[in-house]
Image: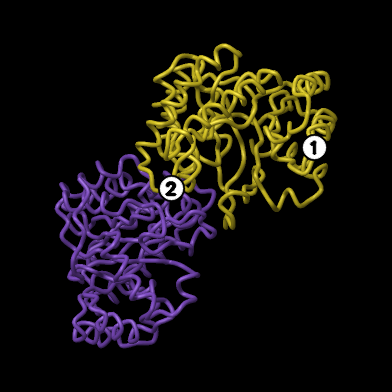
Chain colours: A purple, B yellow
Amino acid sequence: MAAAPLTDFSRLCVHTITTKPWSLEQACDNYARAGVTGITVWRDTLEGRDIAAAGRRLMEAGLEIVSMARGGFFPAPDAVGRQNALDDNRRCLDEAAALGAPHIVLVCGAVPGQALAESRRQIAEGIAAILPHARAVKVKLAIEPLHPMFADIRSAINTLKQANDVAAQFDDYVGVAVDTYHTWWDEQLETEIARAGRLGKLFAFHLSDWRTPTVDLLNDRGLMGEGCIPFRQIRGWIEAAGFRGFNEVEIFSNRLWAGDQAAHLVKIREAYLAHV
Amino acid sequence: MAAAPLTDFSRLCVHTITTKPWSLEQACDNYARAGVTGITVWRDTLEGRDIAAAGRRLMEAGLEIVSMARGGFFPAPDAVGRQNALDDNRRCLDEAAALGAPHIVLVCGAVPGQALAESRRQIAEGIAAILPHARAVKVKLAIEPLHPMFADIRSAINTLKQANDVAAQFDDYVGVAVDTYHTWWDEQLETEIARAGRLGKLFAFHLSDWRTPTVDLLNDRGLMGEGCIPFRQIRGWIEAAGFRGFNEVEIFSNRLWAGDQAAHLVKIREAYLAHV
């Protein structure tokens, strides 16, 4: 069953990549002023900052820190590359802990020309390797399946079923992030959302729309309502699976980044009520 | 098991879209001269021609007509649109019969904003409606699953499993076309190729590569070897499933169309032996 329309912003989270031209401080002030209640922090946004202080500033502004993006990229052609990835993921976990984020999102990685099954094996191995550190710093891991058009270089995990299959091998510190943009086309989406819910592994729910035509694989996502994704249907499945977390707006868009970000934030609020 | 390298061109088919700048006559003469043995004809290439005469010319040049592309696009928001699609598919079947093509490839269609399940229902309904005509003119129907990045507007059938599910509802006049570009990422590909083989529905095998980075969703495919697709692995699955038809090169590429087409054809032959 499709979800009923949202009537307030108590579960609206905005990912800082959505307003990429803004610094973390600008995002913090503008989100809070606009009544946004949650924030996900793109790791690059923290560059050169005292991370604990940045986290305090967000919380003092009334924003709940929903997650930090992103870790992952575990597969590599050689052991040195895979070890570097583990080191970087542990640093990412430390930063998330300092910030106060409950989980990091994992864009799991892939190596062009390496068999996808081998990359998935390396991903599971990488998660196993960093999991003790994740528990030590109390930051969970959310595996995000990426659209199959990113299977060459960004992730060998391209369906929620694959993400669930990996997450199911681990304890409650490993779950999944469901992004409408990456998963909307998948016939098994409803079933796998329900499975993630049963497993207690539904950590995050991300929103952006699929535009027609899409002119860039990476940075041409749409604001909700600009494309063809049935948000209320998918949110209905998410909520039926027991998810009560934030609805997180994460839009990579050269077009939207080029415009006025304050106006963009107003439209995000409108689209959230009208389409999510 | 991966297939052994190919050592001759006895099963090399080239799709005329691969050398888009060439007329049908130029493609015919150049393919035959280069030792290509099969040809698939893009329907637009026939514009303004006596189709039966065009078919005779191809056969007299020693080319086997492998298929005609493309029918499909069954879904529409209203009955008039769906009826128009049926009429056009019947014309397409007539043209394929006149040409001498044993099957047409179906790019099945989708409507942005219409539920994918509803589009798939309309696709099955459309195939059922044109099937008597297909039998009458002795031209089969090959359902081609398209990459999920085309789920908005080109096809609601995005995995070989979905194509098999639809084909399995019909008799031996309905099968599937497996395109490496559209399906390489799919964890279920080997299983579903085997299933198509068991069902006697493996009608066609298309080749092009996935480049990193891919800069255009429609027209940035690669020559085999330019990307990350494991062709020998997939051809091994295809042949293990009993397929003995043509290995069909079908490359949509603004980059390759911009170059000299005779040199392009030389490289296709080289890539065929080196990578397929």
Chain ID, mark 2: B
Q: Residue A88: x percent and y percent?
A: 38, 70
Q: Is mark 1 on a helix, strand or loop?
A: loop
Q: Amino acid type of disc 1?
A: Ser
Mark 1 crowdedness (10 Å alpha carbons): few <14, some 14-19, many ≥20: few
Nearer the observer: mark 1 or 2; the answer is 2
**Left or right relative to A27: residue B264:** right
Q: Is residue B174 above or below residue A137?
A: above
Query: Which of B10/A231 is in front?
Result: A231
Give the x, y percent position of residue B172: 49, 14
Write down the residue under mark 2. Answer: B112
Q: Answer with left or right where residue A13 lies relative to residue B225.
A: left
Where residue A274 sits: x, y (%)?
A: 28, 62
Residue B2 is at least partly visible in this image? no
Dot 1 or dot 2, earlier in sequence: 1
* Kind of residue indicated by mark 2: Pro
The residue at 44%/61% (across/down) is A221
Taking the spot 24% from the left edge, 41% from the top edge, the residue there is A191
Q: Is residue A59 left or right of residue B45?
A: left
> Whole-percent x and y of residue B234?
53, 33
Residue positioned 44% across, 17% down in the render:
B199
Q: What element carries label 2?
A: loop
Name the foreground residue: A243 vs B242.
Answer: A243
Same chain for the residues at labels 1 and 2, yes or no? yes
Is label 1 in contact with label 2 (beta carbons under 8 Å)? no
Q: Quadrant of residue A43?
A: bottom left
Q: Is residue A263 above or below residue B173?
A: below
Q: Which mark is residue B23?
A: 1
